[in-house]
Amino acid sequence: MIIYENTKAGFSDDVLKGIIEKKINAAVFKKMGRRTRENEIRSWINSFTSRTVAGRNQRCLIRNRMPSA
């Protein structure tokens, strides 16, 4: 399931503006009907802010794997 989709430039802007975690969290709730734990949100922030995204015309997708039953 795709949770977030944007261009790399849009993704970089969302990270730099500090709104990426809000967008992903809102999408998780909308698509999966659940809230995200605080430690998972911190993990996203730490992961995204430590990366440099190169290329302006490529797409960025964040997928969520459903837990196996």
Image (cartoon, grey):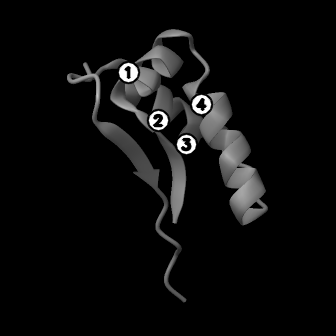
Q: Nearer the viewer, mark 3 or mark 1?
A: 1
Secondary structure, mark 2, is helix
Which is nearer the N-term, disc 4 or disc 1? Answer: 1
Tell me if mark 4 has few (under 14), some (14-19) or many (20+) residues whose alpha carbon lies within 10 angstroms of its own: some
Q: Which residue is mark 4?
A: 21
Of residue 32 and residue 69, the one placed in the foreground of this image is 32
Tell me if mark 3 has few (under 14), some (14-19) or many (20+) residues whose alpha carbon lies within 10 angstroms of its own: few
Which is nearer the N-term, disc 2 or disc 1? Answer: 1
Residue 43 tag number: 2
Q: CA distance from mark 3 to mark 1?
A: 24 Å
In the image as oriented, which residue stretches furthest toward the front?
57
Q: Which residue is mark 3?
A: 40
Q: CA distance from mark 3 to mark 2?
A: 5 Å
Q: How many marks?
A: 4
Q: Position of residue 45 (x, y in %)?
A: 48, 26
Of residue 45 and residue 3, the one placed in the foreground of this image is 3
Say left or right for 51 vs 27: left
Tell me if mark 2 has few (under 14), some (14-19) or many (20+) residues whose alpha carbon lies within 10 angstroms of its own: few
CB atoms at circles 3 and 2 under 8 Å apart?
A: yes
Q: CA distance from mark 4 to mark 3?
A: 10 Å
Which is nearer the N-term, disc 2 or disc 4? Answer: 4
Which is nearer the N-term, disc 4 or disc 3? Answer: 4
Q: CA distance from mark 2 to mark 1?
A: 21 Å
Query: Which residue is drawn at the image coordinates 67% and 41% (left, top)?
Result: 25
Q: Position of residue 22 (x, y in %)?
A: 67, 30
